[in-house]
Amino acid sequence: MNGADLLANGQPVTLEEMLLAREKRASRQRQALDCYRLPLISFLLVAPGAVKNSPVWQRVAHYAQREILALCQQQEWVCVWEKQCDARSGPEWMAAVCAPAKALKQHMSMLEEQHPLGRLWDIDIIDSDGRQLSRRELGLPARRCLVCPQEAHVCARSRQHTLEHLLDDIARRIAGYERHDCN
């Protein structure tokens, strides 16, 4: 697998579509918070470039959902509601969970750090009051770059790595996971 495989059968998304997707996601989050009054897990992919959804990205999102739900089950946290969206802006998933928000954030941050594909996952936790919890408030370090040890925002801002380099690295990571760990 190479970086081009991530883009295969995917369509580029526009800035307007990304902004609209963000608005719709925020609306779904507000509705779920109003209805369930429980912390939310809100999942997106870290997908550099204009193609945010393709068969490969959908598989990566499926692996994340599977791992998140398994972790919730292991912790005996009950998901009372789930919503999945599959748009050109990328696969999205959210769930209302009977669990302490800080514990959710700690465990989901560990999943992002420790799972072979976790760096490709953006798992946000929103408490029952609608406040998004940060890694910093739990004493966790900032997310690292996809390909080097720098903080992600440093490399992104400086465009340290080419899109081709990022996508090739991501494709190798996915191929390795699917070859060895996926089954």
Image (cartoon, rainbow, N blue to C red):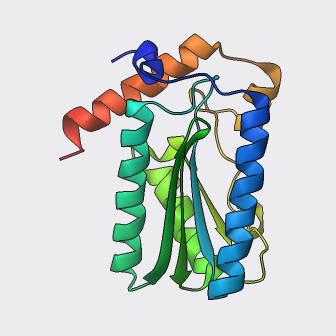
Residue at 61 percent across and 22 percent down: it is: 12
Q: Position of residue 139 (x, y in %)?
A: 72, 65
In the rendered image, which quarter contains the N terminus? top left
Looking at the picture, how far across and down is residue 135, in whole percent?
A: 70, 61
Using the image as rendered, state which of residue 177 and residue 57 is in the foreground. 57
In front here: 64 or 92? 92
- Asked if 168 appears above or below 95 in the picture, the reply is above
- The number of discs equals 0
Percent across and percent down for residue 51 are 57, 25
Q: Which of 127 and 86 lies nearest the eye of the viewer? A: 86
Q: Is residue 75 left or right of residue 137?
A: left
- In the figure, is residue 125 to the left or right of 20? left
| Residue 74 is at least partly visible in this image | yes
Image spot of residue 19 (x, y percent): 79, 41
Position of 40 compared to 182: left or right? Answer: right
Task: Tell me the residue at 69%/53% (across/down).
Answer: 141
Quick one: which residue is furthest to the left in this view?
Answer: 183
Q: Is residue 107 above or below residue 61?
A: below
- Residue in view at x 42 percent, y 64 percent: 68
Does 165 appear above or below 52? above
User: What residue appears at the point 38 percent right and 86 percent down from the top-left corner?
Assistant: 76
